[in-house]
Amino acid sequence: MILPVKKERTKCFDRLSYIHSLNRKDAIADKIASSFKENDSYVQVYKNFNYDEMFDIWCYNGTAQDKIEPYKKFLSYPYSDIKFRIGDYVSFDYRNDGTMSHFLIESCDYQKTYDVSGRMWLINQELKWLDNDGVLQNYKAVFQDSLTYTNFKYGATGFIEQNGSIVVLVKQDDTTKNIYINQRFMFSGIPYKVKQILKSVDSSFLEIYLFKTPALQEDNIEDNIAFNGKDVIENSMDEVEIIPAVSEISYGDRIEFSVYNYANGEKRNDTFVFTGSGIDEEFYKLETIGGNNFAVTCLKPNDKNTLSIICKNSESGEQTVKSLWLTEGGWI
């Protein structure tokens, strides 16, 4: 049995596969711990901006070679209890230049305390806004274009959020969970408006989809703080609602959806034209039911790409996309 020490061009996670045949958890942890710090990928990190305590991890490349949108994979030292969770911030001298870089943990496997591993994204922006009391809120965040993020996350081809141009990843807590649809934010002097918020990934993690929106005179471009006054909120309640809010359909199941258009917060009786794209028709059956209802049946699972149902407003021509995974049942 060979321990995973100092062998280049070998992924850290692959080095651990041999130990899963051991029967005792303590024995496995001892094997990993005995040479953990000798590995080329070993690094000491801080967590959640607490610089009084350090933790040991293996950290290595997980992104494409160009590293335009860099993420890293990590493996925690086999502590007796779990030290890292989704939504945690991890900090260390990533660039080897004496400055601290920060990462946000997007995924993490907690099944075995000796094999706590996951993926984390490099922080590259700040999410700033004034709350209802006029207090500045500032969170370290990951700013990505929608195409890059969805391509990576949902398969080789991916899908594009038609009404969103960026994705922001941020820690979910008692403050960020109050971010709302149509709230405005600013990055590098460019204002964006929230189109969709995904909170279902983990209770400590948010995915926020936004699209560009016109600048307002009240925007603070110098400090990157977008204006969200009462007038803006009242006049921005235009959205399309698709219910039920499900993201997957299991093999053989049929689900009916309703689409409603809201203008200034009031529901309208708009009609829509529904078309499917993203995957071949052999995987699904799409039915139009009246002017604002449709049904989708999963004929065959597809774990590579999502089915995109394009809902085109018959009057305005505006398009809204409903993305659905066609699954064998329970794989997400």
Image (cartoon, helix red, strand yellow):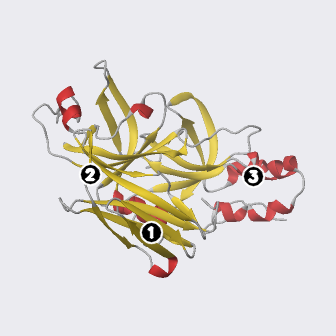
Tell which residue pokes out farthest to the top in this image: 133
Q: What element carries label 1?
A: strand
- Quick one: 269 or 114, which is closer to the camera? 269
Alpha carbons under labels 3 and 2: distance apart: 66 Å
* Disc 3: which residue: 35
Q: Is mark 3 on a helix, strand or loop?
A: loop
Tell which residue pokes out farthest to the front in this image: 290
Say which quadrant the C terminus sits in.
bottom right
- Front of the two marks 3 and 2: 2
The residue positioned 68% from the left and 48% from the top of the image is: 116
Q: Which amino acid does label 2 sit on?
A: Asn
Q: What residue type is labelled 1?
A: Leu
* Disc 2: which residue: 269
- Front of the two marks 1 and 3: 1
* Disc 1: which residue: 307
Task: Evaluate whether residue 24 shows in this view.
Answer: yes
Crowding at mark 2 (Cα within 10 Å: few <14, some 14-19, many 20+): few
Location of residue 235 by image quarter: top left
The residue positioned 51% from the left and 64% from the top of the image is: 325
Q: Do the residues labelled 3 and 2 touch (CB within 8 Å)?
A: no
